[in-house]
Amino acid sequence: MAIQSLAVFCGSKNGNNPLFVKQATELGKLMAENNITLVYGGGSAGIMGTIADSVMENGGKVTGIIPKLLLEWEVQHRGITELIICDDMHVRKRKLYSLCDAALILPGGFGTLDELFEIVTWNQLTIHDKHIYILNSGGFYDHLIQHIDKMKEEGFLYEEAIKRITVIDDPSALLQFL
């Protein structure tokens, strides 16, 4: 099945490595060029804002989903195709998952890891069967990938869920899966 919408989970900060912003910008352009709608957390800051800006600047579509709490902090993106306001973070994640055909994880913090592990867990529980991609920008997720391998070696992971995770090092590598 062709990917028409991609949930992207990433940081609301830029991080220290300029590669993170560079690859988020490249990804946004690739998504727009391939008519893939960005579905993301609705923020305007950090890598999150960068990818939304890039998709929009390149003529693509962006759906942001933001909880009321973050509206109060005034971090919502005001220049995207659609902004959906929801009650809380749990509703936000459920809506993000329901609107995407696949998910891509970029560098980020605790929230990004929460979203990664929840979508993988839902995959494992057969709540959905969406493929998950990790963009390992500059080796950002090397240690996490090693830990996932260790969990598998130690017998804690189900094979079906692991088979739905693909690690890529460059946004252009995603094109072969579209």
Image (cartoon, rainbow, N blue to C red):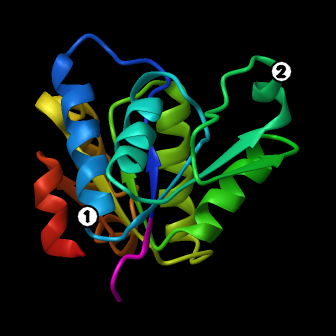
* Residue 148: image location, x then y, percent: 30, 46
Q: Which contiguous range is marked in magenta?
A: 1-5
**Magenta span main SS:** loop
Write the residue at 26% across / 38% down: 25
Which residue in the structure is indicated by mark 2?
Answer: 72
Q: Residue furthest top?
A: 16
- The quarter of the rendered structure image containing the C terminus is bottom left
Question: Between 20 and 154, which is closer to the camera in this rendering?
Answer: 20
Going by the image, does 51 lie left or right of 113? left
- Mark 2: few/some/many CA within 10 Å (<14, 14-19, 20+): few
Write the residue at 32% across / 51% down: 58
- The quarter of the rendered structure image containing the N terminus is bottom left
Going by the image, does 172 lie left or right of 31? left
Question: Between 26 and 104, which is closer to the camera in this rendering?
Answer: 26
* Residue 54: image location, x then y, percent: 34, 42
Which residue in the structure is indicated by mark 1?
Answer: 33
- At mark 1, the secondary structure is helix
Q: Was residue 10 drawn as part of the magenta stretch in this picture?
A: no
Q: Does residue 17 lie above or below 68 as drawn?
A: above
Going by the image, does 29 lie left or right of 93? left
Q: Indicate the amino acid at tag 1.
A: Glu
Could you give the CA–CA distance between mark 1 and mark 2, rounded to whole angstroms? 33 Å
Going by the image, does 102 lie left or right of 25? right
Write the residue at 19% across / 62% down: 174
- Mark 1: few/some/many CA within 10 Å (<14, 14-19, 20+): few
- At mark 2, the secondary structure is helix
Whether residue 143 can be seen here: yes
Write the residue at 52% across / 26% down: 110
Q: Indicate the amino acid at tag 2.
A: Glu
